[in-house]
Image (cartoon, helix red, strand yellow):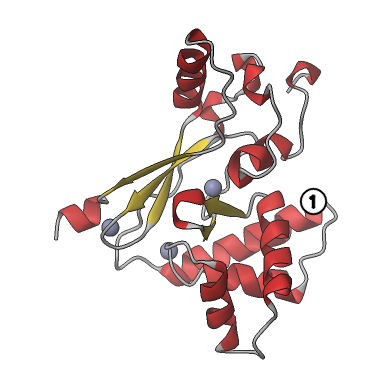
Amino acid sequence: MNSACGVNNGLIRFQHMAGNQRIPGLWDWPSSCYKTPAMTLTKPTFPAPDHDHGRCTAEAIAHAEQVCARRAQKFTPIRRQVLQALLSSHRPLGAYEVIDELAKSMPRPAPITVYRALDFLMENGLVHRIESRNAFLACAHDHDETSMVAFLICDHCGSVGEIPAAPVAQSLNAAARASGFAPKLSVVEIAGTCAHCQNK
Ligand SMILES: [Zn+2]
Ligand SMILES: [Zn+2]
Ligand SMILES: [Zn+2]
């Protein structure tokens, strides 16, 4: 990535994904800043109901360990436990659902402790915030720091899938600018029905 893109090391992605920390002009960067094929979809967007979820969990935890090691960040027990709670399914969980999940195997943690761990996980691209559900999703993909994704939210089973969205983001930005609007869009979330629920 060249320096004209301004931000590196996960910041771009953090801004898009976390949604809270928006920098005006973020979307002004040239399209060369967005690596279109950046998100590798080696996994299905919506894993089959009978898939080996233990493997998803183990891979996501191993990925988190690698990311933390690479960035010299500490993968503390609470950070690991919060990620593990979110990995209990492919559905996003609200902060209090995370606390309930944790309370099954440890003393009930204080909300601030859980929120801090969630912030850390989001900053490092391991968890995404699903704005429309006020909930948090463990990222099951090993995608690039700068990749822009859209979230597909199944109204039936509650699962959330991720798809690459850089071209969509660029054209939305261009359309908004054409109308004289200065966009600060952070995420795209699409509600609907996943393929597995359609086939039921
Ligand atoms: Zn799974
Ligand atoms: Zn992701
Ligand atoms: Zn579904």
Q: Residue at x 30, y 68 (%)?
A: 50
Residue 186, can we see it? yes
**Total numbered labels:** 1
Q: Residue at x 76, y 57 (%)?
A: 68
Q: Mark 1 and ligand 2: say if the CB distance to the nearest ligand atom is below 8 Å.
A: no
Residue at numbered disc 1: 70
**Neighbour tally class for label 1: few under 14, some 14-19, many 20 plus, Cα within 10 Å:** few
Position in image of residue 198 (x %, y %): 17, 53
Q: Quadrant of residue 155?
A: bottom left
- Which quadrant of the rendered structure holds the C terminus? bottom left
Q: Residue 126, relative to residue 6: is it above or below?
A: below
The secondary element bearing badge 1 is classed as helix
Position in image of residue 192 (x %, y %): 27, 47
Q: Residue at x 56, y 32 (%)?
A: 38
- Which quadrant of the rendered structure holds the N terminus? top right
Q: Residue at x 58, y 34 (%)?
A: 147
Residue 124, can we see it? no
Farthest front residue? 180
Q: Is residue 90 left or right of residue 126?
A: left
Position in image of residue 7 (x %, y %): 77, 29
Residue in the foreground of this view, choosing between 91 and 145? 91
Which amino acid type is shown beneath numbered disc 1? Answer: Arg
Q: Is residue 181 left or right of residue 126?
A: left
Position in image of residue 185 (x %, y %): 55, 31
Q: Is residue 5 left or right of residue 35?
A: right
